Amino acid sequence: MGYKVIIRENWCKGCYICLSVCPKNVFEKAGLLDDRGIIVSKAVRPENCIGCQMCADHCPDLAITVEKEDE
Amino acid sequence: MGYKVIIRENWCKGCYICLSVCPKNVFEKAGLLDDRGIIVSKAVRPENCIGCQMCADHCPDLAITVEKEDE
Amino acid sequence: MKQEYLKYIRDNVFPTAFCPGCGHGILLNAFVSALGELDYDQDNLVLVSGIGCGGWIASPHMNTDTLHTTHGRAIPFAIGVKLANPKLKVVVISGDGDLTTIGGNHLIHAARRRIPITVICGNNNIYGMTGGQASATTPVGAKTMTTPLGNDYRPFDLVKLVKGAGGEHVYRYTAFHAMQMKKAFKDVLQKDDFSFFDILTGCPVQYGRRNELREPAKMIQWMKDNSVLYSGEYHDDKIMVGKF
Amino acid sequence: MKQEYLKYIRDNVFPTAFCPGCGHGILLNAFVSALGELDYDQDNLVLVSGIGCGGWIASPHMNTDTLHTTHGRAIPFAIGVKLANPKLKVVVISGDGDLTTIGGNHLIHAARRRIPITVICGNNNIYGMTGGQASATTPVGAKTMTTPLGNDYRPFDLVKLVKGAGGEHVYRYTAFHAMQMKKAFKDVLQKDDFSFFDILTGCPVQYGRRNELREPAKMIQWMKDNSVLYSGEYHDDKIMVGKF
Amino acid sequence: MKEIMFAGIGGQGVILSASILARAGILKGYYAAQSQSYGSESRGTATRAEVVLSEEFVDFPHVEHADIFVVMAEMGVKLFASKVSQEAIVLYDNSVFELSENIGKERIGIPATRLAVDTFKKPLYANIIMLGAMMRHCGMVGPEEIKTVLKETVPSKALADNIKALELGSGLEY
Amino acid sequence: MKEIMFAGIGGQGVILSASILARAGILKGYYAAQSQSYGSESRGTATRAEVVLSEEFVDFPHVEHADIFVVMAEMGVKLFASKVSQEAIVLYDNSVFELSENIGKERIGIPATRLAVDTFKKPLYANIIMLGAMMRHCGMVGPEEIKTVLKETVPSKALADNIKALELGSGLEY
Amino acid sequence: MPIEKKKTHLKAGKYFMQGDEACAEGAVAAGCTFFAGYPITPASEIMETIVRRFEEEKRVFVQMEDEIASMGAIVGASWTGAKSMTATSGPGFSLKMENLGYAIMTETPCVVVDVQRVGPSTGQATRTAQGDLMQARWGTHGEHTIIALSPWSVEEAFYETVRAFNLAEEFRTPVIILMEEATGHLRETVAVREAIEIFNRVEEGNGAPFGGEEPLDAVPPMPRFGTGHRLLVTGSTHDPHGYRKTQDRVTQERLLSHLQQKIEYHKERIVQWEEYELDDAETVLISFGFAARAALKAVKDARKKGIKAGLMRLKTVWPMPTERFETLAAQAKTLIVPEMNFGQLRGEVQRFTGGKKVIGVNRADGEVITPESILRAVEGGTSL
Amino acid sequence: MPIEKKKTHLKAGKYFMQGDEACAEGAVAAGCTFFAGYPITPASEIMETIVRRFEEEKRVFVQMEDEIASMGAIVGASWTGAKSMTATSGPGFSLKMENLGYAIMTETPCVVVDVQRVGPSTGQATRTAQGDLMQARWGTHGEHTIIALSPWSVEEAFYETVRAFNLAEEFRTPVIILMEEATGHLRETVAVREAIEIFNRVEEGNGAPFGGEEPLDAVPPMPRFGTGHRLLVTGSTHDPHGYRKTQDRVTQERLLSHLQQKIEYHKERIVQWEEYELDDAETVLISFGFAARAALKAVKDARKKGIKAGLMRLKTVWPMPTERFETLAAQAKTLIVPEMNFGQLRGEVQRFTGGKKVIGVNRADGEVITPESILRAVEGGTSL
Ligand SMILES: Cc1ncc(C[n+]2csc(CCOP(=O)(O)OP(=O)(O)O)c2C)c(N)n1
Ligand SMILES: Cc1ncc(C[n+]2csc(CCOP(=O)(O)OP(=O)(O)O)c2C)c(N)n1
Ligand code: SF4
Ligand code: SF4
Ligand code: SF4
Ligand code: SF4
Ligand code: SF4
Ligand code: SF4
Ligand SMILES: [Mg+2]
Ligand SMILES: [Mg+2]
């Protein structure tokens, strides 16, 4: 059983608060600018997620949802 | 040695606070209405005055001065 | 009031326009006497007030520069005077409706910034001039024109309000405490700090009339009976007086 | 934010107009999540705000009745709503400039009267929207557009101010305390009392930029490092958080 | 139509007098208008109260040329003399001041304040005494209407004194 | 007289570009006027900046018919096309969008954002790259004036990159 | 039309009331259920009456901390479906200006009474004036339109207050009642009718809750808070659904046009005036409020002297019946505007006279303007 | 006259400034030593510049808690002898109205800048408008008079601010500077002259400190606080010595007449305008502020097409040069008023045209009015 870390990419503004609050280092900056000129956050290590919701609760753009993976 | 209790009668409005604060019962209401329709306060027993200034300090109309009598 | 202190008032406007027994007059008396006892330089003093009977304490009675402003706004005008010429001593004297109801924001900001002015609230717990409506300091249960069945809302405790806003040098006295008030006025007149006075003056006509304190002497007595000198312990059910 | 809580926001206005990392968004997030966790009836909730970035937290983002009013006046409008229809839950969410600088009088009077509304101040210690001028909560020494050499004036401690005015149910959290904030929001959403929140949101762009907190993550870290949970003892040199 | 003007200083109750008169007029079925002027400095400054009684709606509801002028303080005379008709009856409190101005047609001194102090030990009902005197000259309202109004307006414990004052005024010999 | 219009979204620095151009114009002794429009929602909405350069005072200081249109975001095209002269040169960031509209006389794609990211690892100097390209077409100001202005306006640690960006833009082959 | 004939709360018959009191009774009759106020001479008696009557009627009265807050509170209350009102005088009216503009912008029905006293500034609190006529129209910033009524008697203070509420509801806009101290403090006979007409707010209907849709002059429905509409109300420029559009010129233009047209295109339902002896009048007087009573007396006195004078008396002062000004100007040899200020109405009339000069009879010293002074001007004007 | 030729604080030469900045520099040049402000778009840059310049010049800047307080503070400061100023935009301007009236009533010199944005209410903060023209005249309650200036360029923002201070001091009255966002945020070339003329306040002189003495139009001397004059300053009706007279009609009348006459009787020193190509103009345009620049361009374009058009451009908007309106109306075949509102100036001009209809070119959508739209009206007007 794991967690799904969903980022609504078009809502993300690249503030990287999620990177800093995640205890499991799940996120990284995406390499590329999107068409708004933003380098969004990516959940690159979702398998490490412990579902603590720190990222989801601290995202100022309501861009993150962390859900329990359905088995 | 005594005290002179001066009332500026035309400033007095007849609130009788002086009557109530004087520890020595120096004041009385004057018997008659003046031409403003007010029954002013009178220092009828100045000889009792101990110069405590309660009346002078509490008169809302700044109408009372209590001075040491010049010998 | 002493004869020599007449120079601090404009005697041509006496008798005052206040009702008989109006406690604002006792505040006036104490302030004039404080100046007199200090032989204060009246030409370096600017008195600022708002609108209301309390706004008339200084204007026109006091013989200094006076600025009788708009309702609730005395403090901003006073700040303009003080900041533009810091050498002047600037004292605001006005009513509870004026300074704490419509004007509450200016009061708390002045306290927060500790602008070096003195603010004296002639607090009669009501709007006297306009006929006796409830103010922000009207006690719960008190009858006013706008609360004929008794006031529902809690009043400010002005000492707590001003201190909560960051103000220092906060005092409270009643009209009964004419002498203590005078002494405290003398203290702050010699300083260049922010200070605040909650002076319970009592309005026999608009407040007293509706609340069984119609007789000025009775009002003074009531103040005496219900106040307690502050010495470290604050009782919410009493009128705490002193320095806070 | 959970997927199911999307119904509490108007997703057509997302992404928000806030700058990247704006702490107001964290407040929004917590409030939406509080509603979600309570499965709160959004049609019985009226959100009132003033002008400023803080005034945008609710309007247009939240999918409830919203009343985006004039600068500083959200509370009086909210009182009109609440008194005219006491069944509604009325929550004011706005900025520090709005609620405590220009609007401070309405705040203290609402606290005094304990009008049963909730007031949430998105306090970023600055005027964000107008380009970073000092507000009544800007710390001493902080650089702003209007205090380029550092702010001289003491800020309000909003907890003390609101309590000094007579308010009860007073809370403070920072953007770092997203979860605690959410829990407290849930508590007051279920009550019909006056309550007040000082939520330190942080404005990385207008405040942070000038005060070495340009990176949102750094700002959050700073909040974490400088705050202390209140448990009876109040330290003026720390950001005290919790219920007061 | 009759125009009646009352003048005095704050606290003398001239507005009350006017209002009683107007209400009494209403009871008689007249159109009535009553106005006044007083300052914020409502204590110790000149007050004026006016009543217009008429069979029908009156376009201009203020006194233009008072038919009756009731004046209780000297400062009222000068201030308002211009609004007094040359045909007017002037009733003034001659226990308070002497009327030197030559206004109106007939000038009648009523020692209302002295009578009030003598009778009630306070100047309080001087205005009602004057009202009583005025009533006789106005002719449009009678003691019945005024008493009815008094019953509705004054506190019950003061009613008897008010009626006494009214009768004192209306019964005066002069 | 030349009218130059810049368009983009908030944060792309179009106002800065315009202001640099205008100041450079002043250095050359021209009259310059520079204006802009942006919302309170200054983030993510269309921004327009205008420069008018002239030998003498210009009555109407806004762009009526832009001689040069520098556009860095697609939403700027539609919004401001009506203010572009039919004779205009249009410079657009073709690393951000493709210009489908048929505006102006000549349309030149400049991959400014891509160049900026490639060179400086961030999109920050795209506006200066565009400014460099624009300069060639404007003809009223040269690199010297612009560099002088840059020296006065940008933080010294960013100066070298800014100048590099300017030269990148002005030296482009197309 | 959502107009209802309703029994007046007072028994039909004659009353003796003060103008302020009649205004408050009018509000009760009109169905006002929310009043927020702040004391000020000479308007406090409105609040005093409201306190007493609302207690009896179980409606909501609140005394706020200032006039700004009072204005805000009545707008908030209005969005819950309440008919709401505030009352003040000059200094307080000035303070309300920002939130008055908010009510205009958000199309919030409410009634604002200004009992005019002598200004500028604190002036003379107990003295009468008509100095706020132009302020009522232009006191708030930005281009806008307003409705203002001017009762001339205590009886009209009652009925025009009812009309103010009806217009506020029908056109979703704040309506100002401009009274003078002279009327506010006047006690006078008031004939109360059996029944009055009430306009009930249209809460549900076609279209979005804010204007800017076609037709531009249509008044949009106004749902109330708490009924699932999830309303977006804002004083910033907004589209018909309430979304802020602070960059978009089309939205601004449509919104402003809507706000103007919903009133200007329906002047026939809003603008009321009375005419006295105008048929053959060569001297035409135009006036409003208390001044018009003196003017009417002057007209009658003039007629007695054989002067062909007549009076147009505005009941609605904003917008004005400008077309009628034009026809009257064409008819008149002399145009006279008596008012208790330095010529505010005169200036408005002057625009529509085809060049004919308008004579003012003005007084701004705190006393009511007199029939005599107006008659003198009538006589002077005819002998020009 | 207490006029002094003073070296400008800036070196003579050409500058590139924003309108807001130029306004602040004008204040510094004029000798303003006290500024109280509150942030608002699009006026904040005035405050931003003041902060920087006052720091350098050791003058007093204070950011107050709101616009009401800012207005109060500058009045208080003025009584200490300081030249004082505040700056705001629509919503804040509305809030200042009560204290603006106080400044008028107490004859307190000060300068109030309103950088106009789109209204009503919060409207569009970053967009331009001329919607506050009438509010500047009538926004505060009670009969009163005002002076307002309207610079049309950044350079004029500088010089008209200097003139505003001079007029404020000469006539002891608040002076309003009505700018548009379009000018406030415009960056433009400003030529700063070597020296400017400064009016120094008359502190000692004949007569009492307040008006109402003969002659009524004379400006009384204004002593400062702290110099032994024991001044009585009040916004209530007062006699020449400052004593409150709130019952007395004579005092009120004299005071009001004084406040009006000191400005109206000296219009020649206050009212300034410019004329362009009017000598033979058949189409006369009248405009102000930013709109006038578009109008001038339109006039020049029209001339190129052989149309005899000319422009009158108001620099002083209140009071207005009404006599010149009359002569121009007599000369013109067509009168056109372009402005960024729904016709506020047009309405004023319309009073003085002897019946000739004035055509408006109006725009209130937040964009600047364009020469093209005005030219179209000029062409349309001539082909009527
Ligand atoms: C803006 C404004 N609102 C209201 C008033 C009316 N007003 C005059 S005095 C006053 C109340 C004064 O109360 P307070 O300050 O307590 O003084 P008091 O008369 O009780 O001494 C009010 C509301 C006003 N003058 N201006
Ligand atoms: C009456 C008025 N004054 C000033 C403004 C300009 N203004 C808009 S937002 C704002 C400051 C908002 O600050 P705050 O409430 O702290 O919100 P933030 O943007 O920091 O979240 C100001 C002064 C206004 N809109 N209305
Ligand atoms: S916290 Fe949210 S907005 Fe910020 S980078 Fe992460 S996903 Fe993006
Ligand atoms: S839920 Fe916790 S562990 Fe998982 S991604 Fe978010 S912050 Fe990291
Ligand atoms: S206290 Fe003063 S005013 Fe009152 S009765 Fe005594 S002397 Fe008169
Ligand atoms: S000084 Fe004291 S003892 Fe003497 S009269 Fe006054 S109160 Fe009485
Ligand atoms: S009304 Fe009250 S406060 Fe005013 S003068 Fe009378 S007693 Fe004093
Ligand atoms: S300016 Fe500050 S408060 Fe406003 S959106 Fe940006 S970060 Fe947030
Ligand atoms: Mg009081
Ligand atoms: Mg803030």
Image (spheres, coloured by chain):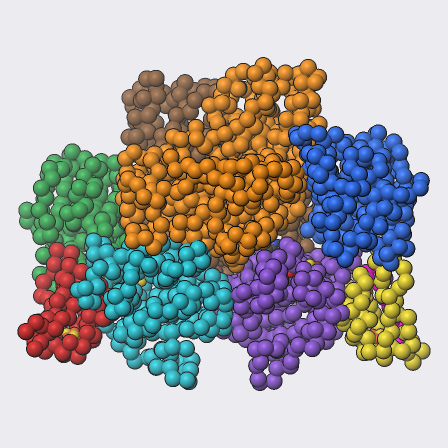
Chain colours: A yellow, B red, C cyan, D purple, E green, F blue, G brown, H orange
Instruction: Give percent across and percent down for residue G106.
Output: 62, 49
Q: Is residue F126 above or below residue F139?
A: below
Name the quarter where the C terminus of chain F is drawn.
top right
- Residue appearing at x 37%, y 74% in the figure: C172
Q: Is residue H285 above or below residue F49?
A: above
x, y percent for residue E168: 11, 55
* Front-lying residue, E156 or H364: H364
Residue D119's spot in the image, x, y percent?
Answer: 60, 67
* Left or right of residue D55: residue G267: left
Q: Residue at x 80, y 38 (%)?
A: F142
Q: Quadrant of the N terminus of chain F?
A: top right
What stretch of residues is rendered in magenta? A3-12
Is G351 in front, or is G156?
A: G351
Q: Locate residue D161, reporting x and y percent.
A: 52, 71
Instruction: State yes or no: residue C33 in magenta.
Output: no
Q: Quadrant of residue E163?
A: bottom left
Give the camera-side residue of E111 and C132. Answer: C132
In this picture, residue F163 sits left or right of residue H88:
right
Q: In the picture, residue H310 is in which quadrant?
A: top right
Q: Is residue C40 above or below residue D177?
A: above
Q: How many numbered discs, if any?
A: 0
- Residue E173 appears left or right of G132: left
Instruction: Report the front residue among F111 and H143.
Output: F111
Residue G3 in view here: no
Was residue A7 drawn as part of the magenta stretch in this picture? yes
Q: Residue at x 89, y 55 (%)?
A: F119
In the rendered structure, the answer to whether residue H228 lies left or right of residue G222 reads left
Note whether residue F27 is visible: yes
- In the image, what residue occupies the spot 59% across and 67% down? D141
